[in-house]
Image (cartoon, rainbow, N blue to C red):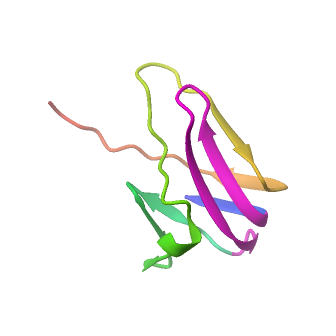
């Protein structure tokens, strides 16, 4: 879940340069949910406000940076995948 203050937010995995960007004015009054390659706000698809990117994870520790906003609150939730 993503909430921020500003007109956009970019979340970058600096280990592999994958980037997710959401453009839209926010003052912690909107919550964006990134589910795979789709972004939702109040269960409505808001992909048109994104760069159609996603955050790719590497094995081990990943280094994440956030740009383009004044403040942010991000919660990562990863489902378990059984092989």
Task: Give me the residue at 67% from left, 67% from top.
Answer: 23
Q: Is residue 55 left or right of residue 82?
A: right
Determine the residue located farthest toward the left in the rendered image. 83
Location of residue 19 (image quadrant): top right
Relative to 82, say whether 55 is above or below.
below
Relative to 17, say whether 54 is above or below.
below
Image quadrant occupied by the C terminus: top left
**Residue 1, image x, y percentages:** 55, 58
Q: Is residue 80 left or right of residue 42?
A: left
**Residue 58, image x, y percentages:** 43, 26
**Residue 70, image x, y percentages:** 85, 55
Task: Give me the residue at 48% from left, 70% from top.
Answer: 47
Residue in the foreground of this view, choosing between 55 and 78? 55
Q: Is residue 3 magenta?
A: no
Determine the residue located farthest toward the top in the rendered image. 60
Residue in the foreground of this view, choosing between 23 and 30? 23
Span colored in magenta: 6-29
Task: Give me the residue at 67% from left, 51% from top.
Answer: 10
Question: What kind of secondary structure does the magenta stretch mostly adopt?
Answer: strand
Tag count: 0
């Amino acid at each position: 879940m993503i909430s921020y203050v500003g007109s956009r937010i970019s979340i970058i995995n600096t280990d592999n340069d994958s980037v997710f960007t959401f453009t839209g004015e926010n003052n912690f009054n909107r919550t964006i949910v990134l589910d795979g390659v789709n972004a939702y706000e109040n269960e409505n698809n808001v992909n048109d406000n994104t760069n159609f990117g996603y955050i790719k994870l590497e094995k081990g520790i990943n280094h994440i940076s956030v740009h383009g906003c004044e403040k942010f609150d991000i919660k990562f939730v990863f489902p378990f995948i059984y092989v």
